[in-house]
Image: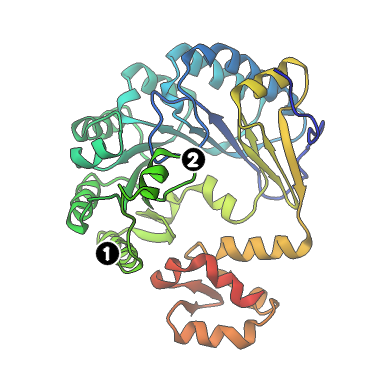
């Protein structure tokens, strides 16, 4: 197999920054591919060993380019699908070659059917202090429609298991807007999730992505998407219910019981703090420079076998692109943007009063932030200032 080489970059060091960068590690393996998912993953266990050796090589490539990381996030794919010895070896390599701050948030994604007592002990002993469970629903009919490998019972057992293992910061990933799912179905899942008192809940609307089985079924009329009115109803009902249970709606899709349980890793994404991505298809950001790895395990492995960074491409953002991206990301969060900073954007003084009157934005203290209805159109809010 020959590698495309036009966009390979030999060095992509992160600049010094007063805020510690984040570290993301993409584990590109799943037991099976969910029909709605367009994240890069494969289900070929024969690639585990070669991938693990390759990512160990990539870790070494970056070990001397910065001092500390403030967050670690193992995502996928499904990190916990790895056999215990592979997962242990990956963690050992990361902690041996790279340095995390003593107080760093260390998160791992897990599916209910992949959790074992041995893996939970490994994670606890390794210092992981946050676990994100891919629950999606507590309704077996919905889980079957999504082709998830676990049941509602397995989800409940997984939550109990991570608590018994000592995890004090647990996130539940949930999904709504699924064909045939009623608002009542969704509310029941939210109620059950809330009764478990996780520190964090993420609620994502199902989106139909190109090149997925769900997209093909939608195109031939076999699956129906939510109407705009239904999207609003689901979203606002979610926000109202979880806030009534004491959760802070701090980002479009994310809720936390207290500010200390906000996802520090994701908050850094939204603040444009530099981050390094390792593994196939991962992305990295160094202020105005973004680069990304091959979206192929095979290309990724071969590149590193040849002693080259597995970088497929890179881009340098213009100052105006950085300003627009910062605005887009800030309007995803409850904190919004500093009023004085926002007023430096084009058309701010002209359009801000209208957006406040329309109850899409509000001024709290010295910040302009989206309302829950503003979250619904967050991606378009920035267009009013550019």
In the figure, is residue 205 to the left or right of 271?
left
List the residue tagged with mark 2. Answer: 211
In the image, residue 296 above or below residue 352: above
Distance of mark 1 from mark 2, alpha carbons? 31 Å
Q: Residue sitting at 66 percent across and 23 percent down?
A: 299
Between 260 and 229, the one nearer to me in the picture = 229
Q: Which mark is residue 217?
A: none
Between 127 and 49, the one nearer to me in the picture = 49
Q: Can the viewer see residue 138 in this picture?
A: no
Outermost residue toward the front in this view: 220
In the image, residue 232 above or below residue 18: below
Q: Residue sitting at 41 percent across and 51 percent down?
A: 207
Report x, y in % for residue 140: 19, 37
Q: Quadrant of the N terminus?
A: top right
Q: Can the viewer see residue 71 in this picture?
A: yes
List the residue tagged with mark 1. Answer: 237
Between 299 and 243, the one nearer to me in the picture = 299
In the image, residue 265 above or below residue 376: above
Quarter where residue 101 is shown: top right
Q: Residue sitting at 38 percent across and 34 percent down?
A: 34
Q: In front: mark 1 or mark 2?
A: 2
Q: Quadrant of the C terminus?
A: bottom right
Label 2: element kind: loop
Report x, y in % for residue 96: 63, 20
């Amino acid at each position: 197999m020959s590698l495309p080489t036009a966009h390979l970059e030999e060095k992509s060091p992160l600049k010094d920054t007063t805020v510690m960068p984040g570290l993301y590690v993409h584990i590109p393996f799943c037991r099976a591919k969910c029909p709605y998912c367009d994240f890069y993953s494969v289900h070929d266990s024969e690639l585990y060993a070669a991938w693990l050796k390759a990512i160990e090589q990539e870790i070494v490539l970056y070990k001397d380019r910065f001092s500390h990381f403030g967050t670690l996030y193992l995502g996928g794919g499904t990190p916990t699908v790895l056999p215990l010895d592979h997962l242990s070896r990956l963690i050992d390599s990361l902690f041996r070659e790279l340095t995390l701050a003593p107080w760093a948030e260390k998160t791992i994604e897990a599916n209910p059917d992949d959790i074992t007592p041995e893996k939970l002990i490994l994670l606890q002993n390794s210092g992981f202090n946050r676990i994100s469970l891919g629950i999606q629903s507590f309704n077996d009919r919905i889980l079957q429609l999504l082709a998830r490998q676990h049941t509602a019972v397995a989800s409940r057992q997984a939550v109990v298991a991570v608590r018994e293992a000592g995890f004090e910061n647990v996130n539940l990933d949930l999904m709504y807007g699924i064909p045939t799912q009623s608002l009542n179905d969704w509310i029941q899942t939210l109620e059950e999730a809330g009764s478990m008192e996780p520190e964090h809940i993420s609620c994502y609307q199902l989106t139909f992505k190109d090149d997925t089985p769900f997209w093909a079924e939608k195109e031939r009329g076999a699956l129906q998407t939510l109407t705009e009115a239904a999207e609003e109803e689901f979203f606002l009902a979610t926000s109202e219910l979880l806030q009534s249970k004491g959760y802070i709606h701090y980002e479009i899709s994310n809720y936390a019981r207290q500010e200390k349980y906000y996802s520090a890793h994701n908050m850094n994404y939204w603040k444009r703090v530099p981050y390094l991505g390792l593994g196939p298809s991962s992305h990295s950001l160094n202020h105005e420079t973004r680069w990304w790895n091959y979206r192929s395990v095979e290309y990724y492995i071969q590149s590193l076998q040849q002693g080259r960074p597995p970088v497929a491409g890179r881009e340098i953002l213009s100052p105006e692109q950085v300003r627009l991206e910062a605005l887009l990301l800030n309007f995803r969060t409850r904190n919004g943007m500093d009023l004085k900073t926002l007023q430096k954007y084009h058309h701010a003084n002209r359009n801000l009063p209208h957006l406040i009157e329309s109850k899409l934005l509000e001024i709290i203290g010295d910040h302009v932030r989206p309302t829950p209805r503003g979250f619904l159109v967050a991606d378009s809010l920035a267009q009013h200032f550019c």
